[in-house]
Image (cartoon, rainbow, N blue to C red):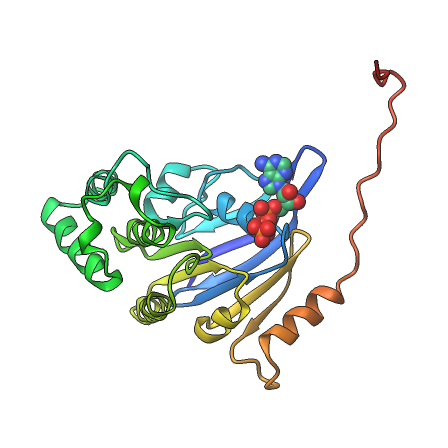
Amino acid sequence: MSVLRVSGLEKSFGSVQALSGMTFEVAAGELFGFLGPNGAGKTTTIALVTGQLVPDSGEISVLGVDPTEEPLEARRRVGILPEKQSPPSFLTPREYFEFVGQIRGLEPETLADRVEEWVDRLGFRGKLDTLHTDLSRGQQQKVMITQAFLHEPKLVCIDEPLANLDPIVQEQVKSFLQAYCADGNTIFVSTHNIEVAESICTRVGIVADGTCLTVETLPLADGSSLRDRFIDTVSNQEPRDMPQRVETEDAPTPE
Ligand SMILES: Nc1ncnc2c1ncn2[C@@H]1O[C@H](COP(=O)(O)OP(=O)(O)OP(=O)(O)O)[C@@H](O)[C@H]1O
């Protein structure tokens, strides 16, 4: 069954075309990697899938919901770990998790149990009552990972899950992500870390210029490395037409 389906997505920001025909599908139980160079459209795709942006055209289905039509419902069903976002500086992890637990409709006992699991898993029990502003980047990332999984969503969209984490915690998070998918859940993970994607993902989509160029099952059937496949795929793509500069007759004259 398809958990996430994206078809012919187009999205522009002014004259910048971020997505041009983005198409791919992710099935239940997959740990699907989304790989691409800077500016390929990965973050834009996650924002569309999670109802934070509206596409210009194209179709999205997230756990059977169209996030363009029902953004709140899509966000309710999906766990989101956005790129480069920090928990609120003026709250402690405990306060933030209470807030997230209420939004996610968790019973207080369930929330308490899950927070216990996560502080043990990621080792930040001693920081539960420290303001986020006084936590390190890695400790803040642990809080952000926890909030994405607290309601145990069927689908979690993650941008760079291992950013700022030390190698030991990275291994713990990688194992957790694999176990979570082995239980039948699905993770969609955008990353620049090709070796991490190769070690944990079941399939990867390689994207560039707002398009999914190929989807590969891992390990690659011909035994080549994902890094080589990535470089070959991205460097062999046809260059996209660059937007033409539009000359206007009444352009303002410089003072
Ligand atoms: N709000 C915005 N306004 C204008 N342009 C934007 C906006 N958001 C994204 N873009 C442009 O859309 C394109 C895709 O950006 P996006 O952030 O989705 O790429 P990405 O694959 O996540 O890149 P990276 O790996 O560098 O994080 C880029 O050219 C970017 O400059």
Question: 194 or 3: nearer the eye?
Answer: 194
Q: Residue 97: x, y in percent?
A: 23, 44
Q: Which residue lies most toward the top here?
A: 255
Q: Which residue lies most toward the bottom here?
A: 223
Question: 30 or 126: nearer the eye?
Answer: 126
Q: Residue 123: x, y in percent?
A: 23, 61
Q: Is residue 73 left or right of residue 231?
A: left
Query: Residue at 53% across / 48% down in the picture?
Result: 43
Figure quadrant of residue 239:
bottom right
Query: Residue at 59% across / 75% down in the picture?
Result: 226
Whether residue 56 is visible to the viewer of this picture, yes or no, is no
Q: Is residue 131 above or below residue 193?
A: above
Q: Is residue 8 left or right of residue 246?
A: left
Q: Residue 135: x, y in percent?
A: 31, 47
Question: 167 or 253: nearer the eye?
Answer: 167
Q: Is residue 26 above or below residue 135?
A: below
Q: Is residue 139 left or right of residue 7?
A: left
